[in-house]
Image: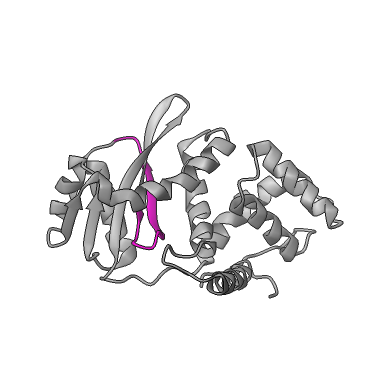
Amino acid sequence: MSKPVSYKRHRFPPEIIAHAVWLHLRFPLSLRLMSLRLIEEMLLERGILVSYETVRRWALKFGPAYARRLRHKTPSRRNIWHVDEVVVTISGQKHWLWRAVDQDGYVLDEVLQTRRNATAAKRLLTRLLRKQGCPPRRLITDKLGSYAAARRQIMPAVEHRSHKGLNNRAENSHLPFRRRERAMHGFRSPRSLQRFVSVFSAIRNLFVPSRSRRSARATHLHRLNAMAEWKVAADVAA
């Protein structure tokens, strides 16, 4: 756990700030401004008068701090990495968001780059090895040749399967991001996109159960545990 979250010089209690940030980052309520206005209305229904601009500033300030404090999945050599890239247009220029998820759909890393080549793929795999601390059991990608070139340099001993049909896990993991991108009418800058996905994916990893089959009771317990962990990350009373 990193250093505590400081709420100094904020007149609202930490519980209200954390709840507003959670609503904004967890649910794609509608368009960017409308989402904030809906959160403003939800809080007003509870007797809390706060402007949508304040909620936006809270999300920018506290969202990254919460994401850093969320518990990360323990790395394992048995993991299977599904790697893919998705194109994002920002101010008329194409960028590629390189993403990696494991066999459970847990987002391992995301990095925005301006190129779609072996150098960009190598950067992603290098970041993954540094963050995870160990190589995967298997690497699954689509047919893009850049992955094979990067894998030979970074992790030559790792099994690599390159087939579009095998990489549905990565393809499906793009969908929540795409829905949020449409709701927000895109992103204004590469920096804002990188900052958003790092927080959005950390919170989604926490609250969304793994893709293995779960009973209704197990899903309910997972959500209760996730909410308790969220409150610990936000430094608010359970």
Depicted 1 relative to depicted 127: above or below = below
Q: Which quadrant is home to the C terminus?
A: bottom right
- Magenta region: which residues? 100-115
Depicted 220 relative to depicted 211: above or below = below
Residue 188: x %, y % from top left: 53, 33
Depicted 165 relative to depicted 88: above or below = below
- Residue 144, image quadrant: top left
In the image, 89 versus 165, the foreground residue is 165
In the image, 214 versus 107, the foreground residue is 214
Residue 130: x %, y % from top left: 30, 62
Residue 47: x %, y % from top left: 87, 56
Instruction: Name the residue at 36% across, 46% down.
Output: 171
Residue 108 is inside the magenta segment: yes
As drawn, is 59 to the left or to the right of 129?
right
- Residue 99 visible (yes or no): no
Outermost residue toward the top?
A: 92
| Number of residue marks | 0
As drawn, is 130 to the left or to the right of 23?
left
As drawn, is 201 to the left or to the right of 225?
left
